[in-house]
Amino acid sequence: EPEVTQTPSHQVTQMGQEVILRCVPISNHLYFYWYRQILGQKVEFLVSFYNNEISEKSEIFDDQFSVERPDGSNFTLKIRSTKLEDSAMYFCASSLQGINTEAFFGQGTRLTVV
Amino acid sequence: AQSVTQLGSHVSVSEGALVLLRCNYSSSVPPYLFWYVQYPNQGLQLLLKYTTGATLVKGINGFEAEFKKSETSFHLTKPSAHMSDAAEYFCAVSQAGGTSYGKLTFGQGTILTVHP
């Protein structure tokens, strides 16, 4: 069964460092998303990506964040200068058609900023 | 704007008992509604979804949910709990149409514990 894969499963980084979280969406999907879940809080939408550009982003997704689909298979989330409050579980998701189709989620990357 | 409220951050039931996880939503446009489940150390897995048509939807593992527009609810039920149902359950809403690209708004999650 096709699945969304995320690497690494856990990343520890020092405050101020750049991190790149990687995701391989399901191959025929067209819509890609990043969500995050701070410990004890809701899963929050960060950004959606379609047709090689950001289609929607939340207020959380400020200039410190960027997304890219560099090679047609990977989908990455970059945080330029990490803060302690960026510590969270980050989920990548993809869907075939966006609106009324299921979003498939990866297992998540736990980011710890120290 | 959309929002989701899940009543009860923790629900505990005995094996074989009815499972009822509550979800209420707020949406200014017709919603699509979802229940996801997260087992320990795993990603979010879709249990079921409501988009259009029949308001009672059946999902995997014997779960079902009923969309009640008048009550703005989408409660998740299972007649008989199994130990393997222990997990965290998330209700989510997305916007049907318009400029939405499938963005999901999640509730805070309900941890289901099943006792022998």
Image (tube, grey):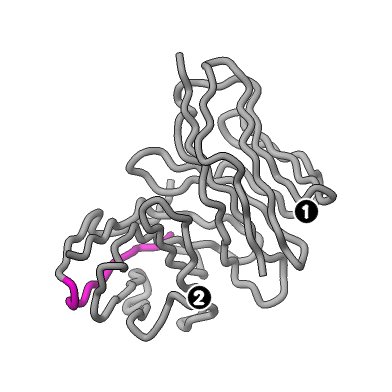
In this rendering, is residue A94 above or below A49?
A: above
> Judging from the image, what secondary structure is the residue with disc 1 in?
loop
Name the mark on residue A58: 2
* Location of residue B61 in the rendering, given as x and y in whole percent from the top left corner: 56, 30
Query: Residue at 62% of width from left, 32% of height from top?
Result: B63
> Judging from the image, what secondary structure is the residue with disc 2 in?
loop
> Spatial distance from mark 1 to mark 2, Cα to Cα?
27 Å
In this rendering, is residue B61 above or below A105?
A: above
Q: Are marks 1 and 2 in contact (CB under 8 Å)?
A: no
Indicate left or right for A34 with B18 as reference.
left
Crowd rating for badge 1 (residues with CA inside 10 Å; few <14, some 14–19, many 20+): few
Instruction: Name the quadrant containing residue A68.
Output: bottom left
For disc 1, the marked residue is B52
Query: Residue at 54% of width from left, 78% of height from top?
Result: A56
Q: Considering the image in quadrants, where does the C terminus of chain B appear?
A: top left
* Location of residue A109 in the rendering, given as x and y in whole percent from the top left corner: 30, 57
Q: Which residues are magenta?
A: A15-26
Query: Residue at 65% of width from left, 45% of height from top?
Result: B23
- Asked if residue A71 lies in the magenta stretch, the reply is no
